[in-house]
Image (cartoon, coloured by chain):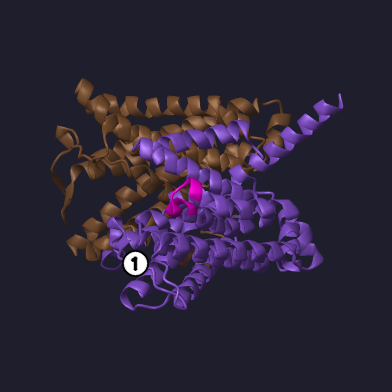
Chain colours: A purple, B brown
Amino acid sequence: MKKPFLLILISIFLLPLVVRPAIASEIWIFAIFGLGANLLLGYTGLLSFGQSTFFGSAAYVAGWMMKVHGINAFLALVAGIGVGALSAAAVGYLCVQRSGLYFIMLTFALNQLFYFTAYQWTSVTGGEDGMPGVPRPALAGIDFKDPLIYYAFVSLLFLLALFLMKRITESPLGKILQAIRENEVRAEAVGYNVPRFKLLAFVVGGAFSGLAGVLYAMLFGIVPLEAISFVFSGNVVFATLIGGSGSLYGPVIGSFVFIWLSESMSTVWARWPLLLGVAFVLVVMFLRGGLVEAWTRFWTWRSSKQRD
Amino acid sequence: MSFVAAQILNGIATGMLYALMGLGLSLVTGILNIPNFAHGALFAIGAYLLATVAVAIGNFWIALLIAPVGVALLGLAIEYAGIRRLYAAGHDYQLLFTFGLALILSESIILIWGPIGSSYLPPAILRGGADLGFTMYPKYRLFVMMAAGVLVFATWLFLEKTRYGAIMRAGIENKEMVSLLGIDIQKLFTVAFGLGAWLAGIAGALTAPIRGLNPGMGPDMLGIAFVVVALGGLGNLLGAIAAGLIIGVAQALVAAYWTEASTVVIYAVMAVILLVRPQGLFGIR
């Protein structure tokens, strides 16, 4: 487990040399978002298609508080994490009572509830144009206006989030969630209150999404309507699956690939979501199990070759 | 009073369309056991096809027949080329696949028909209003109400009274048992997907003269179809009608007094119903 961590550290240092700091920051922000989504998708086996609800709500609320009330960065982060967890608790409460396909459809429908609220509430959210003018307030005398300093801040928070998620997945709570994923009936029979643990997974995942949402708003200075749309929810599912939902590092690799892919495609063609759709279809057809598994398969194939 | 009555009629007309959408989705989802995120895009393509064909041949009625068949054929192609290979995969990959498909279809709509929405007028005989005694009401909406009613009834007849319908209902209940009885389950899946696509296509075609055409209509309707299924239950015809009418009428009534909330209300009503009845209207799973 030391090796992936070292690789991540190296990438954090090398990334700003290769791409613009804004994109580098976006990668780690999206990775935090992915870590939260993967707690549901990968560890609990809950296919939430509404993760942008928590991401977007946090971005709007914390962004508004920074913009209008001038709160500092620390308070903004706390507010974002709180809103993320709270909105996830509300959505989760309704969703965990149903399972399977109903669950997926409910997460999507409730995502639409939040989306259309943001879409119509133009006096606050700016509707389709997004909410501009989100500042990047200083924290403890450190000015985040410099994109590289902000990048360092984001990277630090990402490492913190990664460490925290590692501890959560290895904790008894993480084990219970995985037990629910493997066999819900058995977990129930053993005496665990399954809906309550699913709800807890929602809340923790929502808190991570909220953190990512605030950082995103601060990074671009605007909360686009897209941040609370089903498109974002789909993107994080894709990033998690392409990385490999079975591992802690899957969504990190996934967001790396996804942001890089979408950034390079979106500059080439306005209709790039079409290419994204094609990418989704191709991954499902040929790359099930994600990059982590493909990597492992490649190495086992190579080592078996060398033995021959 | 006549204003409220007209709004309720509006709600019934759109509610029937919602029911039709939900019904198609619930057939596909129930029988194939996949989350179908492309259902909304198929709806949008139905609307665009109707407008294009009607303009090309100059006849609304023939276009109304052709457009849904076109969507059904597209559905069959999608099932044959992609979804067929995913029955053994998890819901996560099925979801990603149908979502990717929805993106491809929505973006193709923009590529073919342009990003700007447009309006589409109903045929000449159905323009203008009819005097119902208590209110004047647009003829086309009355037609939609009847057409959607007939379609829902026909689907009910098909599912309840024909042999193939019985097989489909059995397929929702227990797929293994159906295939053990010597029925080609693969064919059943293909037919179900085609039928679901056809229903989405005709709902889209009927909607075009009411709401016009715009690339966002697919995702919007997808969310509504999910609401109908979540409230009404998979494969539950009565549930789909009840859920469709409830959200349709609620939406129309709220829209009359507070236009901005007209879309939000659909989902808010769903959230409230689920708070009281987490298992949905008729208590399934």
Left of B262 or right of it: where is B285?
right
Chain to which the residue tagged by mark 1 belongs? A
B279 lies left or right of B182: left
Dot 1: element: loop
Dot 1 crowding, Cα within 10 Å, few <14, some 14–19, many 20+ = many
Q: Position of residue B37 (x, y in %)?
A: 48, 42
The picture places residue B227, in percent across and down from the top left corner, at: 45, 53
- Which residue is denoted by mark 1 in the rendering? A134
Magenta region: A17-24
> Which residue is at 75% across, 35% downward?
A299
The residue sitting at 72% across, 67% down in the picture is: A173
Q: Quadrant for residue B151, please give it.
A: top left
Magenta-span inclusion, residue B49: no
Q: Position of residue B280 (x, y in %)?
A: 53, 59
Q: Position of residue A145 (x, y in %)?
A: 38, 66
Is B127 drawn above or below residue B226 in the view shown?
A: above
Compared with A41, B113 (above or below) is: above
